[in-house]
Amino acid sequence: YSITLAPLALKDEVIVGVGGGEYGIRGFIAAFDAHTGKQLWKFYTIPAPGEPGSETWGNCKTATAYCDPDAWKHGAGSAWVTGSYDPSLNLIYWGIGNVGPDYNGDQRPGDNLYTCSVIALDADTGKLKWHYQFTPHDEYDYDSVQVPVLADITWKGAPLKAMLWANRNGNFYVLDRATGKFLLGKPF
């Protein structure tokens, strides 16, 4: 593992995400008690078999030259940049990096959640509230580690708690930050 970001401090927690996708890690975001250092929760950015999203890591049952049934164990999903926090929703938003191996997707069929996504986690428990994957089954190293910009805007005549995201895949996105609903995606 490595770390390339500043911790996100809120309430009595210090939240960090790990880098190291190039080392074949299984990425995660974790919260620690600011006073004791005790780990409070951990969310893996690559789901293990049986966890929500694990079905997006291929369907090969045995290893072949083209398919690795254990790709999730070393699928990357780094968190290179600090996320954002919305105190009114008590959600933290974190951009997740590319999948590994990054340029050859044959070993890892499927969309490969939660890589190249933004995840919204309950700040107290680390439970996933929603996610949006910008580049499913990425083969171009399109990390989604940009800073989530939170803005209260007017959208189609109504107030909206928005998330604005200029993604490495060349598209600008607007999402509803309470629900993760896709509202807009345009090339920039």
Image (spheres, helix red, strand yellow):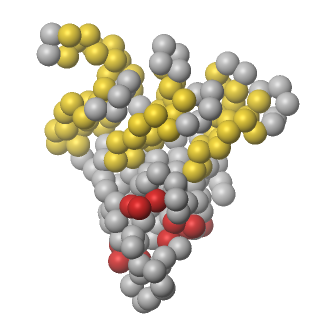
Rendered view: 46 above or below 164 = below
Task: Report whether 36 appears left or right of 157.
Answer: right
Q: Which quarter of the rendering shows the N terminus?
A: bottom right
Q: Percent position (x, y) of residue 38? A: 81, 36
Q: Percent position (x, y) of residue 114? A: 44, 51
Q: Look at the image and tell me whether residue 188 can be seen.
A: no
Rendered view: 116 above or below 62 = above
Name the one closer to the observer, 56 or 167.
Answer: 56
Q: Percent position (x, y) of residue 97? A: 45, 52
The structure residue drawn at horizontal position 57% and vertical position 50%, both measured from the top left corner, is 44
The structure residue drawn at horizontal position 56% and vertical position 67%, both measured from the top left corner, is 74
Residue 22 position by quadrant: bottom right
Residue 115 position by quadrant: bottom left
The structure residue drawn at horizontal position 28% and vertical position 15%, both measured from the top left corner, is 160
Task: Report whether 54 appears left or right of 5.
Answer: left
Residue farthest toward the bottom in the current orientation of the protein: 65
Task: Report whether 185 appears left or right of 77.
Answer: left
Name the one closer to the observer, 69 or 11.
Answer: 69
The structure residue drawn at horizontal position 41% and vertical position 37%, both measured from the top left corner, is 130
Q: Percent position (x, y) of residue 140? A: 32, 63
Q: Look at the image and tell me whether residue 75 can be seen.
A: yes
Rendered view: 69 above or below 49 = below
Name the one closer to the observer, 103 or 178.
Answer: 178
Q: Which quarter of the rendering shows the C terminus?
A: top left
Residue farthest toward the front in the current orientation of the protein: 50
Rendered view: 72 above or below 104 = above
Q: How many numbered circles does the render carry? A: 0
Residue 24 position by quadrant: bottom right
Task: Report whether 180 appears left or right of 100.
Answer: left
Residue farthest toward the right in the current orientation of the protein: 36
